[in-house]
Image (spheres, rainbow, N blue to C red):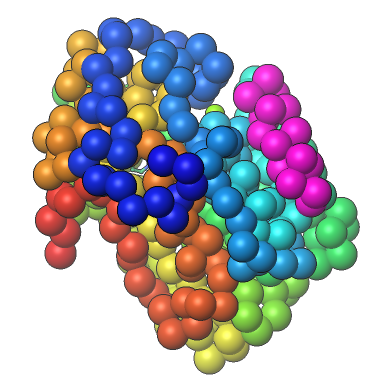
């Protein structure tokens, strides 16, 4: 593969990985993840599809958000990167890659489960760029728990605050700055339709994100602001190795998709680019499933 436009076999475009059992504490560092995910560092080729746009991407230090930040910068957008302060090491690498593309990259670390930070994030991006056109609500918390009895009130609350409340806080703060042509893109999951028993709180938020996105999309469409969602299937990221799944599930991760392998973050970025660009002008309230072939409603 030379870039994302190469017509190779999608089943074998990336190897069917067998990650070793491993466990980090959340949110984890991608630089310690084995094998290393492909964020498109060496393959994503921009064609000016987001020239001059100004974007916020949450969870932009690693995984899908990092692949999106790299792709947006190479498509010509300035990018404000949100992530947790403990992820600075991962974030630095992505900021350098975005700047290598010749765009502005702003580091705005903080905790999106805190509404004050969500508002500060938007204000800092608007100040830094002099405007805002794209909001990607991508950050997420996923901690598996086998039994309802063991799922703490604190975890349930923190998962909802991080995954769904933050979308409300960030979208609301961003709205006064968004003009017609702007877009909001939210990361949901195949878990919205096929909830795993051990991801009760997480799957609940992902179904909520679909409803939130479709309702807000109808509200904002008349104002020329489009809202859509992307629903990834199994994608190899540190989320899975930092409490997202039992470590002994990792060697089989993604093997049950029709393509027979996990996705790589680089394969998600084009969906976000499409929804952020003007090419998707008639796409509103859609959930774009990027999951290796798992059937969805
Ligand atoms: P990731 O761990 O690389 O990214 C998640 C990011 O969320 C972290 O890097 C972190 O910066 C951010 N985050 C978590 N809690 C936060 C908080 N309180 N404040 C600020 N930031 C916080 O993993 P990923 O797989 O790239 O996840 C990105 C999104 O994709 C998530 O919403 C996840 O639910 C979704 N998703 C992932 C998969 C998958 O298989 N990897 C599948 C479906 C959906
Ligand atoms: Mg991270």
The image quadrant of residue 175 is: bottom right
In x, y percent, where is residue 276? Answer: 55, 67
Tell me if 176 is positioned left or right of 60 in this view. right
> Relative to 122, does residue 90 appear above or below in the rendering?
above
Using the image, determine if residue 90 lies above or below residue 128: above
Going 21% across and 41% down the picture, which residue do you hit?
11
Where's residue 239, x and y in %? 41, 28
Ligand 2: give its quadrant. top right
Decide if residue 217 is on the left or right side of residue 137.
Answer: left
- Observer-nearest of 268 and 199: 268
Quadrant housing residue 217: bottom left
**Looking at the image, residue 55 lies above or below residue 38:** below
Q: Taking 293 as reference, is 67 left or right? A: right
Asked whether the viewer can see residue 202, the reply is: yes
State which quarter of the image contains the N terminus: top left
Quarter of the figure with the C terminus: bottom left
Please name the predominant secondary structure of the magenta segment in the image. helix
Position of residue 126 in the picture relative to residue 235 (left or right): right
Indicate whether residue 101 is drawn in magenta.
yes
Residue shown at 54% from the left, 32% from the top: 62
Residue 159 in view (yes/no):
no
Where residue 240 appears, as percent x and y from the top left, is 35, 25
Would you say residue 163 sits in the magenta stretch? no
Image: magenta residue range? 88-103
Q: Residue at x 71, y 67 (%)?
A: 51
State the image coordinates of residue 244 (x, y, percent, origin top left): 33, 25
Q: Eyeballing the image, is 17 above or below 219?
A: above
């Amino acid at each position: 593969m030379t870039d994302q436009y190469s017509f190779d076999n999608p089943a074998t475009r990336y190897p069917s990985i067998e990650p070793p059992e491993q466990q980090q504490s959340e949110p984890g560092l991608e630089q310690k993840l084995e094998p290393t995910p492909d964020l498109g560092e060496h393959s994503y080729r921009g064609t000016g599809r987001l020239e001059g746009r100004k974007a916020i991407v949450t969870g932009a230090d690693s995984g899908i958000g990092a692949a999106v930040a790299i792709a947006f910068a190479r498509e010509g957008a300035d990018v404000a990167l949100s992530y947790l302060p403990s992820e600075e090491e991962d974030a630095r690498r992505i900021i350098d890659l975005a700047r290598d593309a010749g765009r502005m990259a702003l580091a705005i670390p903080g905790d999106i489960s805190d509404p004050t930070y969500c508002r500060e994030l938007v204000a800092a991006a608007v100040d830094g760029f002099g405007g805002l056109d794209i909001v990607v609500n991508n950050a997420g918390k996923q901690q598996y728990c086998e039994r309802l009895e063991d799922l703490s009130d604190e975890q349930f609350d923190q998962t909802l605050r991080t995954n769904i409340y933050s979308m409300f806080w960030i979208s609301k703060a961003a709205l006064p700055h968004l003009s017609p042509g702007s877009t909001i893109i939210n990361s949901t999951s195949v878990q919205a339709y096929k909830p795993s028993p051990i991801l009760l709180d997480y799957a609940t938020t992902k179904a909520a994100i679909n409803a939130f996105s479709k309702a807000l999309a109808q509200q904002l469409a008349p104002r020329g602001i489009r809202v859509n969602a992307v629903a990834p299937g199994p994608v190899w990221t540190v989320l899975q190795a930092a409490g997202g799944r039992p470590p002994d599930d990792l060697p089989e991760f993604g093997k049950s998709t029709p393509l027979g392998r996990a996705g790589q973050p680089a394969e998600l970025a084009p969906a976000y680019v499409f929804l952020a660009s003007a090419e998707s002008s008639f796409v509103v309230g859609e959930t774009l499933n990027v999951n290796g072939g798992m059937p969805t409603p």
